[in-house]
Every structure is written in structure tokens, then in C-alpha cells.
Amino acid sequence: MAVALYARVSTIKQADKDLSIPDQLRQMRDWCKRNGYSIGKEYVEPGASATDDRRPEFQQMVADATLKPSPYEVIVVHSLSRFFRDHIASALYERQLNKSGVKLISITQQTSDDSAGQMARSIFGLFDEYQSKETGKHTLRALKENARQGFFNGSKPPFGYKTLELDLPAAKGKKKRLVIDESEAPTVRRIFELYMSGLNGCEMGPLQIASHLGDLGALRRGAKWTRNRVQQILSDAAYMGAYVFNKKDMRTNQVKPEDQWVHVSIDPIIDKQMFLAVAQKRHDRSPAVTPARVVNTPTLLTGLLRCGNCGAGMTMATGKGGRYQYYKCNSRIGRGAGACCTPAVPMAKMDNMVLTAFAEKVLTAERLKEMLQEMKRHLKNVSSGQDDTLRVLKKELAELETATNRLYEAVEKGLLPMDDMLKGRAQKLKARRESILVEISGTKRMQEIPTAMLTARQLESFSTALRARVLDRSAGFSKRYLREFVSEIRFDGKRVVMRGKKAALLAAATQKEKDTTGVPISASNWLLDLGSNQGPTD
């Protein structure tokens, strides 16, 4: 009789350090030899739980066993817990095998094929399932306590961190803490900076950031950056020092109730203010918050105009069969005229009023000059220590290149063997070099913002070009510029108040003079909020 053997342990660590799999295979081979069975194939599952069927070798074994004709008649396991630790799932898979003429035999829990044997197998299965759940419960309790004490339970730390092993006398085995990996942390900081501030006056999303890092040659532990990996970085609160253990169920990947989470304080790579600002920006840019129709609709002020009395949005309404178009408070539209006192206003009148006020009161050389002085003061505070930072980074880069060259020279001369240890050292040197280049690039970019080079003529030229673009409704640019430079417009029936983004205007103004006629559609809001830019009109 041809048989297949199936051996399993629950974790990779057990597979590497435990003797369980070799012992399982030895006992099953001896049993087959004593009973005159011929072994057709051995399936070995190193590091997979038997509480579910997400096991590659297990699935391959079942697929092979259910072929017609089946290549073997029996699947042999050391104990039934090696096959499954879920009573119902085990019964379903065993029934599937039986339909193909394949039996399941445990060499340590042998049962007969009659009703008594089936009952015994059910009892074994229920006990294995109970034991698995109890073990999991006690293991999770120990892991949660380990996390409460500030230790790391995982195998791979988040990008930007590494594990520091601590040999504590009172602890069983070595404990691990998360510490900042200075070879990876600059890339994390750069990702947050690019998302918040953009590059060269242009907004950058996760896909653009991943592409930019690829152009710089920056890698994520040997792999290329992707949009999903960048999104993971931007959304992980660990980077502001708030690492969370036991947040998701490992089997279902569902988020657990918050009272089961364990918060672990670690050293932050990103300050809390920056992380929360990025989180708010990600929320604002989410399609669920700002639908594509708000951006794409031809209605000029959709998504910007709000009622000054009740705070509801104001959207287009029509009269006389569509001949007349108005902006009307959503409260009045949904609940009737008594819900709000703000009257409807003709769309054309409001559009012209907003565009004219924006062009004449905001997009002036005088207003831009005032904001420019404020931005210069801000940049001076931010960049006071950038020269020292650049010197330190360039010095470290030179030392790294020297060390790398010496390493390669030693290999070429035969003084050192190119073994795995040396390859690992070379990879670490390369990764640190890439991180330094990314950090130097970000520091230089801040220094190269040409605010001091802007002349009065350049400001006037920029102001004139932008006013012309905004007032030219036929070109289709007005809505895109308003959305870029204005954050909100309020109308209470008597007055229109606009609140804008100073940083976006100034980022566009600091382009070179030859670019002033081609104002970017998307400019970066790379300064912190410096206050509202209000332009009330009667």
C-alpha cells in the first residue's frame, strides 16, 4: 500500500531549533516499515498553525490525494493534531479524502473504522482544539504582558526601527526593544516631508513618492518602494512613538476592539504634530471626504462655498425649468426655507464676485510681498542649523565611501573572503549611503527655495499672470486655481469671506521668472499654517 507522510510544527523557530519534525518523520517511517507500507511522498510543513487550512504543503497534499486515480491510499500523521486542530474542519477534510478512497491514520492515536472509532476520533479532535485554544490564550496573555513592559514581540520591526536584544537576568530568554535605525529613519522622515510639502511646488501622493525614492535609488530593505508601502508608513502611528500590539486578529486580519490593544511607547521618528498634520491631509484627500465630482464638476464653487449662518454646504439649485441657476444652502434644500435664513444667490453673480475679489484683493504684488516676508522669517527659523547638518552628513558620506572602497579592495586582493557576513556588511553600508543621500537631498531643497532672489518685478509679473488666469473663465483654470489657493468661502447673505492658503501662493511665486506665465495647477502647502488669508467683500 502506498502512503504519504505529513509532518508539521507551528512556527519557523520550532522548525529551525526543534527536533520535532525529524522525530515525527523517523517514527512514521519506522511505523510504515513495520506494517509493510511503501512511502510515496513526504509533506513537511515548517511553521504553520493547524487551526486553519492556510498551509501550502497541506493544500498540495489534499490536492494530490484527491486526484483520480489517487497516488496513495493512506495519509499518515504522527498525531491527529498535526493534521488539524479544528474539529469541524478536520472532519470536513477527512470526509473529502474518504470520498477519494484515502484514509487518515495517526500512528499514536489509532482507531477503528466503526462507530466507536469515529467517536474516539471526535473526542481526540475536540481535545486537540480545546488544547490549542487554551495554549493560544495563555501565549497571548504572556505576549501582552511582555508588550506592556515595553518589549517587542514581532520578528520584523517596522521600517525605520531595529530590535535591540537585552539579556536580562530575571527573564527567560532574550528580550527585544524597538530602537530607531539611523540608516532607515531619514527615509521615513523624507516620506512624511514629501507628502506634507511636495517637491518643486507640486503635490506628491504615495505613488509619486514611491517613484521619487526609486529615482534616488532608495530601497526598502532591498526591495523597491511601492504605493502601498508608502501608505503604510504614512498611516503607522508607531512613527510618532505610539506602537500598538494586538491590534489585529492574526487569523482573520480584522481589527480587534480597542480595549484589547496594548500601547507601547517607543522613540518617535516623526514628531506628533507632523504625523497628525499628515493624517488630516490624508483624510481630506480621501475620496470619501472629497469626492471626485466636487473637483470635476463645472460648477465653480462646489465644495468651497458654505453657508455663513448654519455651516452647511451651498450647492447649485435651478429655477424656471433650469433657466436660472443659484447657490442655495443645503439646509434650506433638505429641510425647507425655515431651516436657515441665508438666501439663495445667483450663481453668476457669486462666481464673478468671488473671482474679482480674489484677483483684486489677494493676488496683488503688495499682498504677496507681505506674505513673502512672513515666509522668510519662518524659513530662517527652520533652516538655522541646516549648514551644520549638511557638513555632518557630507562628512559621514565621505567616511562611508572610504570604508566601502577599502572593503572592496580587501576582497579584490584576497585579504577577505566574500562570505555572507561580508555581504551583509556591504549591504548595510550601501543602505546607510542611500539614506544619507536622501537626507542631503531634502536639506538642499529647503536651502534652494529662492525667496531672497525674488524682485518686485518678478512678484508683479507673477501677480499679473495669476490674475489673468483666474479671471479667464473660458480657459477652465479658475476652479482649479481656486481649489488650490482657497480653503473655504463663507456667505451669510450680506458678506463673502474667503480663507486661503498663503503657503500655496508663495510656493508658486518662488518659481523662476521664466515660469511665471505657467503657474502650476497644484502647488505644495509646505509651510505650517501661518494663519488665514481673509478677503471680505460686501
Image (cartoon, rainbow, N blue to C red):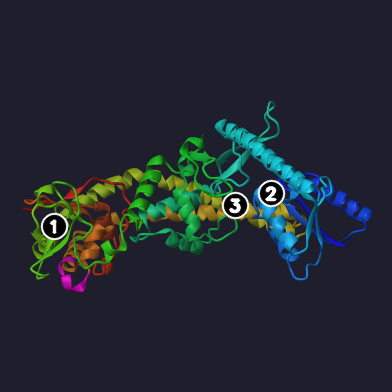
Q: Residue at x 53, y 47 (%)?
A: 160
State how far apart marks 1 and 3 are (Cα): 64 Å
State how far apart marks 3 and 2 are (Cα): 48 Å
x and y, in percent, of residue 497 in the image: 14, 51
Residue 15 seen anywhere in this rendered image of the structure: no
Question: Upstream in the sequence, badge 1 or badge 3?
Answer: 1
Q: Which of 23 and 471 is in front in this view?
A: 23
Q: Which of 365 and 396 is in front in this view?
A: 365
Q: Which residue is drawn at 28% across and 49% down?
A: 376
Q: Nearer the viewer, residue 462 or 317?
A: 317
Which callout, 3 or 2, points to the residue nearer the camera?
2
Question: Upstream in the sequence, badge 2 or badge 1?
Answer: 2
Instruction: Using the image, tell me which numbered label, if any, was put on residue 328.
Output: 1
Q: Residue at x 13, y 57 (%)?
A: 328
Q: Residue at x 69, y 42 (%)?
A: 126
* Quarter of the N terminus within the rendering: bottom right
User: Tag 3's secondary structure?
Assistant: helix
User: Tag 2's secondary structure?
Assistant: loop
Q: What stretch is highlighted in magenta?
A: 470-476
The three-letter code of the residue at mark 1 reads Lys
Q: Is residue 449 left or right of residue 185?
A: left
The three-letter code of the residue at mark 3 reads Leu
x and y, in percent, of residue 522 in the image: 30, 62
Mark 2 closeness class: few <14, some 14–19, many ≥20 residues within 10 Å = many
Question: Is 34 part of what is drawn in magenta?
Answer: no
Instruction: Using the image, tell me which numbered label, if any, was put on residue 400.
Output: 3
Question: Upstream in the sequence, badge 3 or badge 2?
Answer: 2
Instruction: Using the image, tell me which numbered label, if any, was put on residue 50.
Output: 2
